[in-house]
């Protein structure tokens, strides 16, 4: 590509890939879909290889297109950050922040953080992608991710983004316990019905409890199995009297206070370290730096 608009062409192509199609890129950039399509076609003619596969319903990258998008993504992000910093100075933060997070942090951890973030930086657009597996956030086009410490990549920087320690609690509705009885020991749970969660294309999440100072795994009867992406929906089933649920204690405090759910074996609940925000050390765009600052301030409060 030897024309003066080549950098703009690359940005247009990358937006098509990131947004998943010409119309979405058109809305993002404020350009006509025909101009975007013409730009990509011109790039393909200049390079001599197809970059996109087009059907009436979808657009996907060829191998060459994916390689190009992966290489130019960090460069374009760096240029955008440099332009914003040069034009707007140190105080005003604009742009886009894209995070990849597990469902476990959605109901109660993120809302207060983003309330504080939007109060400070109202012009930043935030996109949250909810996934529970291990994700390469760079390849996924995200600025940062949130995960638990035991699965963080070693080459990432991380900061706390919630409670330093979380407890996994067991609970059941009064109707269930009247009908089935209250288990007296962790091993009694093997005779009880449970709401279980399954990892995407993987095993059920294990039930681990503490007994005599040791961590043990128990296998209750999995009468209801939910995908882990719906982890915050299990409480609704438990409140309806369907089985025992294992979930974060902080999600259960209101139910315990109201009596809609009863704690089960509280002396055996295990603890784990809380979630962390993680990101590559080599490039931190301004919206992400601003969000990290909010996380650190929230951690002090």
Image: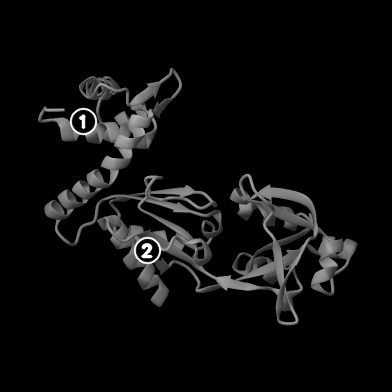
Helix, strand or loop under label 2: helix
- Confirm whether residue 301 shows in the render: no
Graded by Cα atoms within 10 Å as few (under 14), some (14 to 19) or many (20 or more), the crowding at tag 1 reads some
Q: Residue furthest top?
A: 56
The N terminus sits in image quarter: top left
Of labels 2 and 1, earlier in sequence is: 1
Real-space CA distance between mark 2 and mark 1, rounded to the nearest whole angstrom: 36 Å
Q: Residue at x 62, y 54 (%)?
A: 231
The one nearer the camera, 23 or 111, is: 23
Residue that mark 1 sits on: 9
What is the quadrant of residue 214 in the picture? bottom right
* SS label for mark 1: helix
Looking at the image, the residue that sits furthest to the left is 4
The location of residue 35, given as percent across then percent down, is 24, 22
Kindly identify which residue carries mark 2: 116
Q: Nearer the viewer, residue 218 or 23?
A: 218
């Amino acid at each position: 590509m030897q024309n003066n608009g080549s950098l703009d062409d690359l940005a247009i192509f990358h937006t098509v890939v990131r947004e998943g199609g010409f119309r979405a890129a058109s809305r993002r950039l404020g350009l006509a879909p025909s101009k975007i399509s013409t730009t990509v076609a011109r790039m393909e003619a200049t390079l001599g290889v197809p970059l996109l596969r087009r059907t009436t319903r979808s657009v996907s990258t060829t191998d060459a297109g994916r390689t190009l998008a992966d290489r130019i993504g960090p460069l374009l992000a760096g240029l955008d950050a440099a332009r914003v910093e040069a034009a707007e100075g140190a105080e005003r933060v604009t742009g886009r922040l894209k995070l990849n997070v597990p469902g476990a942090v959605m109901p109660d951890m993120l809302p207060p953080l983003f309330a504080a973030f939007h109060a400070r930086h109202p012009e930043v657009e935030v996109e949250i992608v909810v996934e529970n597996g291990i994700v390469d956030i760079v390849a996924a086009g995200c600025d940062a991710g949130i995960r638990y410490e035991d699965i963080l990549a070693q080459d990432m920087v991380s900061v706390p983004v919630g409670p330093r320690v979380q407890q996994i609690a067991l609970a059941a509705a009064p109707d269930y316990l009247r009908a089935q009885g209250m288990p007296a020991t962790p091993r009694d749970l093997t005779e009880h019905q449970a709401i279980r969660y399954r990892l995407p294309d993987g095993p059920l999440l294990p039930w681990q409890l503490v007994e005599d100072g040791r961590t043990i795994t128990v296998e209750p009867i999995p009468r209801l199995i939910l995908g882990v992406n719906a982890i915050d929906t299990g409480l609704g089933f438990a409140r309806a009297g369907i089985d025992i649920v294992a979930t974060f204690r902080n999600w259960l405090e209101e139910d315990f206070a109201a009596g809609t759910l009863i704690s089960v074996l509280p002396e055996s609940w295990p603890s784990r370290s809380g979630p962390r925000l993680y990101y590559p050390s080599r490039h931190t765009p301004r919206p992400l730096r601003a969000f990290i600052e909010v996380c650190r301030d929230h951690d002090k409060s």
